[in-house]
Image (cartoon, rainbow, N blue to C red):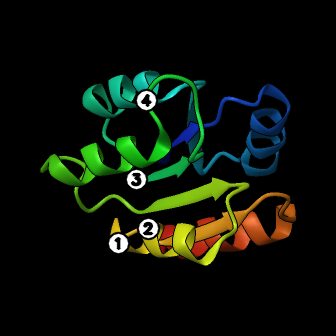
């Protein structure tokens, strides 16, 4: 079973993503802010992180930076899930070594495809 951290502050979107990914293959852990995401990442062995950029408190970008610094999470694929669609934003995500960058709104099929690709 693969463990996925879903860090998203929008409750409705978190529910949609969780519902899309619900499967016996995946264990989904949820965080509604950046600090909660970091706390989970420190205590769990993660296979994938779905990360919103703009969250209260600690931003998704800061979370990604911290994940890349830790030997336990440095190589865990990160998929940014964000409304930020500017080229500079995508470049910033790429600088952090994100596996993919999904701009909201996105289709559930697109999400599934990217998640399956990241975990393969």
Q: Earlier in the sequence, mark 1 or mark 4?
A: 4
- Point out the tag, 2 or 3, that comes first from the N-terminus: 3
Q: Is residue 83 left or right of residue 16?
A: left
Q: Which residue is mark 3?
A: 47
For the point 73% across and 55% down, the residue is 83
Q: Which numbered disc covers residue 58?
A: 4
Point out which mark residue 92 bears.
2
Q: Residues within 10 Å of mark 2 (few under 14, many from 20)?
A: few
Q: Which residue shows up at 65% across the image and 71% down it?
A: 86
The residues tagged by marks 1 and 2 sit, at their Cα atoms, a distance apart of 5 Å
Q: Secondary structure at mark 2?
A: helix
How would you rate the neighbour count of disc 1 (Cα within 10 Å): few for under 14, some for 14-19, many for 20 or more? few
Q: Residue 109 at what x, y percent from top left?
A: 84, 69
Contact, CB < 8 Å: mark 3 with mark 1? no
Q: How many marks?
A: 4
Distance between the alpha carbons at the discs numbered 4 and 2: 16 Å
Contact between labelled residues 2 and 1, with CB atoms less than 8 Å apart: yes
- SS for tag 3? loop
Name which of mark 3 and mark 1 comes first in the sequence: 3
Dots 4, 2 in contact, CB < 8 A: no
Task: Name the outermost residue toward the left.
Answer: 71
- Identify the residue at horizontal 35%, vertical 72% (top origin): 95
Instruction: Tell us which disc is closer to us: 2 or 3.
Output: 2
- Residue 29: percent from left, percent from top: 54, 31
Q: Find residue 68 and report its image quarter.
A: bottom left
Q: Nearer the viewer, residue 2 or 52?
A: 52
């Amino acid at each position: 079973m693969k463990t996925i951290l879903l860090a998203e502050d929008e409750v409705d979107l978190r529910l949609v993503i969780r519902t899309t990914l619900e499967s016996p293959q995946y264990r989904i852990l949820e965080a509604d802010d950046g600090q909660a995401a970091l706390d989970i990442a420190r205590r769990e062995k993660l296979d994938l992180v779905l990360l919103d950029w703009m969250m209260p408190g600690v931003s998704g970008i800061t979370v990604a930076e911290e994940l890349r610094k830790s030997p336990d999470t440095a190589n865990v694929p990160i998929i940014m899930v964000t409304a930020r669609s500017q080229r500079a934003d995508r470049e910033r995500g790429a600088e952090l070594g994100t596996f993919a960058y999904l701009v909201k709104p996105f289709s559930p099929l697109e999400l599934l495809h990217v998640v399956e690709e990241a975990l393969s």
